[in-house]
Amino acid sequence: MTPTSKWAAGLLAAASVLAACSDNDGGAPAAGRTTTYKVAVIMPATEQERWERTAAWALDNIDKAQEGLPERVKIEIEWHDEDSPDWTAAAGQAAADDGYAAIIGPKLSANARKAAQICRERQRTLILPVATSTEFQRIYAGSGYVWNLAQSDITQCELLLTQARLLEKKNVSLLAPDDDYGKSFSDWFAFQATELGLNVAEVTTYRSEADIRSMARRLAAGTGKSNNALIFVPGSAPDALALDDEIERIEAESGSFFTFPKVLCSDMMFSSAILPRLRHDEYDGLAPSAAPESGFNTIYRTRFGETPITGEAHLFDALTMLAYALARHEAAGQGTLNDAMLDIADGREAWGGSWLPGDMSTAFAMLRNGARIDLGGVTGDWTFDERTHASVLNTTYCNWGLHHGQVAVMEYLSTDGSSRTISTVQAWEWQTSGMMTFNKHQRDSVYPALKDRWAVVVGASDDWVNYRHQADALAMYQLLRRHGYDDSHIILVMEDNLADNPNNIHPGVVRIRPDGENLYHDVRVDYRLSDISFADLRDIMLGNRSERLPEVVGSGPADNVIMFWCGHGNANSLAWGSGGDVTAAEVRRAVSDMHSAGKYRKMFFALDACYSGTIGEACEGIPGLVVMTAANPYEPSKADMKDTEMGIWLSNGFTRAFQNEIDSHTGVSLRDLYYSCARHTTGSHAMMYNVEHYDNVFLSTMSEYLE
């Protein structure tokens, strides 16, 4: 049956159901059976007046839509204050009690993670109106019980930066909290700014009010303020008010001719707990919104005399979607409510109705008759990613402004092409477009004939949760073994605590893909990470053998050395497991000492770590060295291969791209290797450093390091 014929059949069935519900003489509809379901709604008490009136409107809509139907669902809300420390206990009770159909909320991403953990054991349906942390949505993608009704903040971050670009700002800074919510922005800000041709001036993740005030002072003192924009991500009302107060102080001190850089705010600012208390004359921002074509915003303003704030339209849709799923679940007579939610999310049969009661009545009847219709609500279409169901694929944002105390919505932006088109269908799969360029005519350096090859492989994490770092190190070790290296020419440093870890449901197995080969075979680990320091590694690289360090790099001036490092990083430092940090200066000193001691002919250093570009920059000027990094100095690198069964990431994006390319094309030029990694590394910009002190990368190939 075609989708059109299915739709027609569904309408006929719905019509027959509606006809059966009415008296023959046209009187009042016959009474039907109503089943009441309890739902725990967790939202901030500071906004509860708004949440309650929006919810009451949604429930009234749902009730009116089912008038006359023989079977009806009714939702009874139990409210819990997200700002109270008791909310987790209430969520735990609701998750464990089959008397509750679902939990809606919380609003904050950090709390959403807690709620998802609470709901995990019973797979209690959890609907999140506007919890938009990217990492949270990635972790719970495919979980089957978490339903996000707004896209992750990757999209919001890009739209904010686009607004800065449209305002002709050249320099952008980020001020975001050091938490789940802020991490979405800090992880993607530099990447997206670079893609949009903007200069990243500063990225600050704050932990205190003092951090907020300090950055405001730095921005105020900076040059070219008319060309600057601040992307501000307030984690709470006090955070927002702290920045506002500091701007007011700065302006009072500076006089009437002072202009603070343009402030563009994330959705948390668009709150009834914040907006009325702001004193600075001008803020702009974005917030998830109802789709303007739905008419919800207009009716809301007529009904309540105000503009809806962040989350209200999505709460309305959360209740509507849940009601549809409950009706579907009742009619199916089997499966779980999450199965019914999946039917609602994946329904593709034509419908074309709206969120108004008359159209919803038809939808309820069709759902009970087995139709899988393409439903939507006031926020737009409820189409989820078919593979992971991490979130809806398209979100509408209102571009709001606060000017001299008056709030106005200036326009609406969306990711489905309503106002502009953005290729962010699950934005963490975004591919890079801006790449480095190199001098094709760079003169080759003179090197002695190649004699031998050596390798150093470091998996720089020592715990289970960072599985991917050791797994990627093992993958690199096995790649080297395939391409000409024996154990006497590889120094492998890793904690070696994955294969027999109690958390490993596949004992003796380490993989970088859920269906991949076991990398833990014929492995000789030279040093456990926790047994040595970076100072020891420097001695190993310099060939300083001792009783405690028997295995060293035995290279000379005619030998090439390849080094692979995978772990965590911060600006100008790398993590050494749980044993502290290694500074960029220490890394530079170790490699520079190798050159001075004649320990290599050429050296290739591949580094997968957050902000690894800072290490590449630190190594500039060392002869015969080239450094390829997973990220530029302002970006984190990304994990991209997850084992949902064990709940861990198995591999990093850059490493997978790098290893795939050199494994299949050992003769690839360094220039082509870089371009391949840049194209296939998602969420960060692969970089290559010190090329001018190495060789012509159009002519140099990886065959100098691999057979």
Image: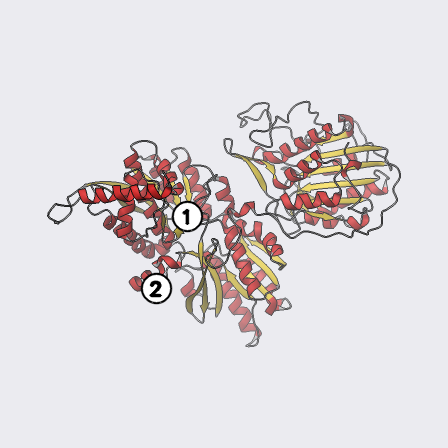
The answer to whether residue 558 is seen in the rendering is yes
Query: Residue 149: which disc?
Result: 1
The answer to whether residue 182 is seen in the rendering is no
Kind of residue at badge 1 = Leu
Above or below for 110 versus 338: below
Q: Nearer the viewer, residue 578 or 414?
A: 414
Viewed as shown, does residue 449 lie left or right of 234?
right
Above or below for 265 versus 360: below
Say which label, 1 or 2, has the lower sequence index. Answer: 1
SS at mark 1 in the image? loop
Query: Residue 306: which disc?
Result: 2
Kind of residue at badge 2 = Glu
SS at mark 2 in the image? loop
Percent coordinates x, y for residue 1 in the rendering: 36, 38
Q: Quadrant of residue 256?
A: bottom right
Percent coordinates x, y for residue 392 in the rendering: 44, 47
Q: Quadrant of residue 531?
A: top right
